[in-house]
């Protein structure tokens, strides 16, 4: 029976987080309501009238669904092969597949643009996804689809981003499956055919994992903004539509139309995402329990070395995972030199020198890196305990049969993922402005949005781990007469430690990728992080040939840092952990 | 613990949700507001990342005056206005740099600026003509022009247009990129130019021209960068990632070809479309924000910005003309040579912009949405 | 002369060049139940896995009388493999070769459960079953495909003595009712005696070809 103080503490944290993560949205909505004179319901009804809104909605639904599908298509074979066989460099492989998820979108966008440009291998095979000549152009002409090449590039980039979701959910399940299950099925009447086996064994075992990854993939693709801006410049998603109008929203008697667009679009987006989140939460629950069943029966069965086909699959995936990052890094060494006789490219470190010296920006790479680390650590210190407490609270509610409350809280912790970054930015600005303007001078303010956005991931990782800890471990420990602390440590914490490390590295990596600072409309230059630096450099006019490679140099530093963080984290992740986040 | 306490305090204080902003008042009724934030001795500049303000420059200023500088960045000139409007009750910056003459009247109408009380000497008449009141100081200028790719036109055997109506015809279908006047200051400047251009014709109607342009598959982008880099074939865009290269013409500055040449060893195939009244004289301003804290620092910075050392280098550092008398574009690498100077440029006065800009934007939105 | 249902000649099997057995011969006639008695680790399970096709033998022959191997052989694992995400009825239903109508399926499953004294167990969850109950259900499921030969790989070794005895007796009765031949491998002589028509020591498989 939990002590009163523990209940109060828990309650405080839970309430604070839920309020903090939803308050900005509420603030922003209230302001928009005042400015536009519409209620949220009216805004919803008026959505079709907002300029570009229906097109944006259609495009968003299309690309998000296609991206989710492609994620499954690319990710499942890799996850299967990884789980099925014993790989020598499993840790490194998993780390490489995890890194895409936390890469800053602008770096990814640049990487992919490099991969599809006219000097690329892809272009040489005849597939021109950028200027859409050749096969793509012919297809566009025939079907009347205006930019199929851009669309394809976008969904491939999304699939790349979300690969790690498929792997984190599916691979452990495949790895833990008792081979006897398969053997038995092949000997039964219904399991004679491949279809029968798929239906009666593989789908029940892996289905929830696949669907969970797919629905999260849908969610992230739906709210994607930077990739859309760079890869599909002719189309808007709801988020990019709001981003292009967001700066002037929420001001009375000034460009009220932008307020109307932002209000309508954010409500539509919120409703769609809320449904997707509810679905995801249900699926993850099902996956957790399915995985528990599977792993209970499957000890770490010995798996053989990978077959040739498996090697081809995984290594192809490996190359795919690294390609954009390698492209971006390589571009940091390539300087164009345009003279009256023509254009040449030279290889050199001038851009790295410029980045290090900070010639083209208000601060240099080292300073930006230091800032990034400060924010990342600050985020970790808050997000990890808060997420942990939230997850354990949800779990406690589940095991004490308060299922509805548990479910509600579960969805509530995912809410920040459903709310448009623009709305949160506006809400934070308004709320802080109104009540504590001096907070703006507080250099650590960007930590707030970082925390709000990373806590859901901490919960997603810790909760399944908590669910899977067998109470018998604690029972055994207490029966042996161990002290409460040692009982907690041996009977509980040892099983949570791995996921906690993974959650930490993810939180650090997200913060490094500057997930939330773009929300804040007020950006003080000397506190810029690495990804803001990249963004700033990329937005400069690139008359000067050093600008773009310098941006790529900064991006490379960021990528390397993130990569090493993940390698470190993977060492702590126990084999076959069903963490899936 | 402290963080939690602050968060808790924030939560407790955040409870009341209502927030009102005073509706805009005319400049006669503007009063100087108290500082919106605490003065800690640092000068906070609100800008759209103008490259003229290099690290070195800022350091020099700090060394000379002892005042440290912080940059608060937004994406474009429109962002500066939006930011000032949004934080009207508690301005976070002291000095704004980058609103141009198409934005300034709105800022002044909304009492967003306060008198700077610096003296401006040696400023060209072209820069001072639009506004020389107490609330803003010009710091750079340029003419907004259509730029086109000479090589592309030559290859397609097309002649250089002599009238804007030619751009609505078949050969130009889908080949022109315009930054949206709603979000981009060069875009806005060009819109103003078209208003003037068509008003000088007997049956000219700018809005129906814009509608025809949309009908002719003109590409509308959010900002200058996307139009120039991603779509325009005549500039450095072809060497940047993500270049699509589907536009032979775009809105930029008449001196942009000079900038191209400057960075390319005196070679460029971009040039400006010289049609009378189809270009617009843009002036960019700096001013002390109403509600600033570090007013002294702001004044010193304005003066610093207008010194010959800094302002004379506008063409190299910020790719714009200086506002000082006797300073021109450098000759190096064909900068001056390739920069075009329109013979007849649209120059609008303050009252014209103040009275019409908002209306033009609304009409433009309507005209381009219906097309 | 009773027709042999299964004939194995000169079978050899090794794992990674470690020999498990070699020169193994066995014949199963009509509907006889044979118990192969041998200590743990001698290769009994491997033999059964070779017969059912889960392993490939290096040398030798395995011949079935009439049907193809897949149709003719049923297999019971040491641990009953009942899928925990399905209830008892759904688990049993996996054994149907041709899918019957829903009504037929219900009737058949009910009848089968009754025959092993597990009436009404249709909607029970797998976790709630005792070892003996689980093994009986696995047995039902294996028999649903009407195999000619049922292979039992020490399926009762995890049960307590009482249950083991009763389930062995019950299984024998049940196999006889259905006229099904079986090979039962075990290390327990009493179990072998209770179950089989003929008890064959492991070593005897290697002497000569068994003749009637």
Image (cartoon, coloured by chain):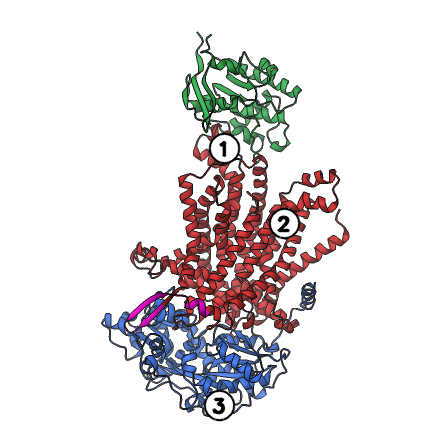
Residue B13 in view here: yes
- Horizontal side, residue B239 vs residue C179: left or right: left
Q: Position of residue B317 (x, y in %)?
A: 43, 79
Chain under label 3? B
Q: Position of residue A225 (x, y in %)?
A: 48, 62
Please tell me which residue lies in front, A145 or A247: A247
Q: Determine contact: label 1, label 2, CB under 8 Å.
A: no
Q: Determine contact: label 3, label 2, CB under 8 Å.
A: no
- Give the spatial CA distance, label 1 vs label 2: 34 Å
The answer to if A340 sits in the magenta stretch is yes
Q: Residue at x 36, y 77 (%)?
A: B259
Question: Is the C terminus of chain B in the top left, top right, bottom left or bottom right quadrant?
Answer: bottom left
Q: Position of residue A17 (x, y in %)?
A: 65, 59
Tell me whether marks 3 and 2 sit on the same chain: no
Under tag 1, what secondary structure?
helix
The answer to if A14 sits in the magenta stretch is no
Disc 1 marks which residue?
A182
Magenta highlight range: A336-354
Can you tell which chain is drawn green? C
- Position above or below: C37 against B116: above
Q: Position of residue A457 (x, y in %)?
A: 58, 54
Disc 2 marks which residue?
A407
Please tell me which residue lies in front, A167 or A131: A167
- Give the spatial CA distance, label 3 vs label 2: 63 Å
Can you tell which chain is drawn blue? B
Residue C154's quadrant in the figure? Answer: top right
Under tag 3, what secondary structure?
loop
Residue A103 in view here: no
Disc 3 marks which residue?
B132
Question: Is the N terminus of chain B in the top left, top right, bottom left or bottom right quadrant?
Answer: bottom right
């Amino acid at each position: 029976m939990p002590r009163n103080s523990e209940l109060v503490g828990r309650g405080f944290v839970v309430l604070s987080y839920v309020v903090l993560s939803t308050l900005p949205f509420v603030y922003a909505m209230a302001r928009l309501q005042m400015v536009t004179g519409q209620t949220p319901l009216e805004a919803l009804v008026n959505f079709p009238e907002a300029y570009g809104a229906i097109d944006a909605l259609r495009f968003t639904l299309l690309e998000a669904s296609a991206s989710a599908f492609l994620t499954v298509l690319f990710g499942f074979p890799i996850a299967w092969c990884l789980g099925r066989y014993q790989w020598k460099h499993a840790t490194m492989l998993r780390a490489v597949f995890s890194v895409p998820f936390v890469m800053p979108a602008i770096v990814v966008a640049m990487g992919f643009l490099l991969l599809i440009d006219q000097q690329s291998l892809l272009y040489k095979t005849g597939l021109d996804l950028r200027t859409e000549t050749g096969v793509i152009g012919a297809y566009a002409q025939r079907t009347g689809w205006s930019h199929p090449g851009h669309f394809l590039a976008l969904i491939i980039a999304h699939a790349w981003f979300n690969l790690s979701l498929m792997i984190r959910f599916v691979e452990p399940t495949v790895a833990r499956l008792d081979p006897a299950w398969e053997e038995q099925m092949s000997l039964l009447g219904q399991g004679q055919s491949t279809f029968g086996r798929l239906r009666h064994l593989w789908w029940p075992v892996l289905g929830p994992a696949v669907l969970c990854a797919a629905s999260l993939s849908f969610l992230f693709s739906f709210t994607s903004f930077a990739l859309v801006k760079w890869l599909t410049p002719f189309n808007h998603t709801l988020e990019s539509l709001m981003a292009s109008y967001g700066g002037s929203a929420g001001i009375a008697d000034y460009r009220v139309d932008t307020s109307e667009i932002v209000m309508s679009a954010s409500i539509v987006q919120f409703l769609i995402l809320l449904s997707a989140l509810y679905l995801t939460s249900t699926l993850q629950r099902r996956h957790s329990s399915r995985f528990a069943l599977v792993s209970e029966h499957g000890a770490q069965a010995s798996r053989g070395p990978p077959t040739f086909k498996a090697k081809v699959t995984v290594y192809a995936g490996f190359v795919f995972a690294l390609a954009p990052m390698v492209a971006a890094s390589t571009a940091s060494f390539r300087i164009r030199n345009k003279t009256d006789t023509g254009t040449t490219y030279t290889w050199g470190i001038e851009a790295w020198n410029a980045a290090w010296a900070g010639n083209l920006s208000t601060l240099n790479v080292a300073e930006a890196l230091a800032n990034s680390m400060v924010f990342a650590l600050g985020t970790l210190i808050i997000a990890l305990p808060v997420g942990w407490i939230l997850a354990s609270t949800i779990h406690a509610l589940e095991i004490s049969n308060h299922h509805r409350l548990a479910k509600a809280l579960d969805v509530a912790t995912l809410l920040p993922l459903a709310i448009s970054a623009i709305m949160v930015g506006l809400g934070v600005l308004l709320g802080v402005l109104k009540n504590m303007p001096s907070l703006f001078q507080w250099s650590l303010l960007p930590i707030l949005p970082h925390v709000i956005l990373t806590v859901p991931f901490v919960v997603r990782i810790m909760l399944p781990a908590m669910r899977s800890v067998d109470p018998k471990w604690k029972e055994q420990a207490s029966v042996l007469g161990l002290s409460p602390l040692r009982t907690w440590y041996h009977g509980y914490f040892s099983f949570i430690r791995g996921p906690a490390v993974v959650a930490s590295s993810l939180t650090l990596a997200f913060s490094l990728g500057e997930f939330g600072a773009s929300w804040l409309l007020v950006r003080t230059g000397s506190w810029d992080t690495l990804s803001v630096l990249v963004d700033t450099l990329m937005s400069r006019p690139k008359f000067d040939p050093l600008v773009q490679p310098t941006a790529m140099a900064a991006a490379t530093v960021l990528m390397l840092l993130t990569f090493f963080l993940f390698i470190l984290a993977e060492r702590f992740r126990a084999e076959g952990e069903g963490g899936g986040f | 613990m402290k963080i939690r306490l602050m968060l808790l305090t924030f939560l407790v204080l955040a409870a009341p949700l209502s927030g009102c902003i005073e509706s805009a008042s005319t400049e006669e009724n503007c009063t100087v507001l108290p500082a919106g934030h605490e003065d800690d001795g640092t000068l906070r500049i609100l800008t759209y990342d103008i490259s003229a303000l290099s690290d070195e420059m800022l350091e020099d200023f700090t060394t000379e005056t002892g005042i440290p500088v912080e940059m608060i960045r937004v994406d474009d000139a429109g962002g500066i206005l939006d930011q000032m409007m949004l934080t009207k009750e508690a301005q976070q910056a002291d000095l704004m740099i980058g609103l141009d003459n198409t934005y300034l009247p709105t800022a002044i109408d909304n009492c967003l600026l306060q008198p700077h009380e610096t003296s401006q000497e040696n400023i060209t008449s072209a820069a001072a003509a639009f506004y020389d009141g107490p609330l803003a100081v010009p710091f750079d200028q340029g003419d907004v022009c259509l730029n086109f790719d000479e090589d592309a036109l030559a290859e397609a055997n097309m002649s250089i247009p002599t009238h804007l109506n030619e751009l609505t015809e078949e050969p130009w279908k889908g080949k022109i990129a315009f930054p949206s006047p709603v979000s981009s200051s060069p875009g806005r400047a060009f819109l103003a130019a078209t208003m003037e251009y068509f008003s000088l014709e007997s049956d000219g109607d700018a809005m129906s021209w814009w509608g025809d342009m949309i009908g002719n598959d003109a590409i509308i982008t959010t900002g200058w960068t996307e139009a120039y880099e991603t779509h325009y074939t005549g500039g450095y865009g072809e060497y940047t990632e993500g270049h699509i290269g589907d536009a032979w013409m775009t809105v930029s500055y008449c001196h942009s070809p000079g900038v191209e040449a400057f960075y390319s060893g005196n070679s460029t195939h971009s040039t400006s479309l010289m049609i009378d009244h189809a270009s617009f004289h843009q002036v960019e301003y700096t001013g002390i924000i109403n509600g600033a804290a570090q007013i002294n620092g702001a004044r010193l910075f304005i003066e610093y910005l207008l010194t010959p050392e800094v302002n004379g280098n506008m063409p190299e550092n910020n790719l714009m003309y200086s506002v000082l008398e006797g300073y021109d574009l450098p000759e190096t690498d064909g900068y001056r040579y390739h920069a075009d100077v329109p013979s007849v440029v649209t120059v609008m006065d303050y009252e014209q912009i103040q009275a019409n800009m908002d209306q033009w934007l609304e009409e433009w939105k309507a005209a381009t949405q219906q097309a | 002369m009773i027709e042999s249902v299964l004939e194995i000649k000169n079978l050899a099997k090794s794992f990674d060049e470690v020999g498990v057995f070699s020169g193994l011969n066995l014949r199963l006639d009509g509907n006889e139940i044979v118990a192969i008695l041998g200590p743990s680790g001698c290769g009994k399970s491997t033999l059964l896995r070779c017969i059912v096709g889960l392993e490939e033998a290096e040398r030798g022959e395995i011949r079935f009388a009439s049907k193809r191997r897949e149709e003719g052989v049923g297999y019971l694992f040491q641990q009953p493999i009942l899928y925990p995400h399905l209830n008892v009825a759904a688990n049993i239903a996996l054994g149907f070769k041709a899918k019957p109508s829903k009504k037929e399926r219900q009737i058949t499953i009910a009848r089968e459960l009754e025959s092993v004294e597990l009436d009404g167990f249709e909607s029970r969850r797998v976790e709630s079953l005792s070892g003996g109950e689980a093994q009986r259900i696995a047995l039902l499921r294996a028999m649903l495909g009407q195999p000619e030969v049922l292979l039992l790989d020490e399926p009762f070794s995890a049960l307590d003595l009482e249950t083991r005895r009763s389930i062995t007796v019950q299984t024998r009765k049940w196999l006889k009712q259905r006229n099904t031949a079986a090979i039962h491998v075990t290390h327990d002589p009493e179990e072998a005696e209770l179950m089989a028509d003929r008890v064959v020591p492991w070593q005897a498989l290697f002497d000569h070809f068994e003749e009637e």
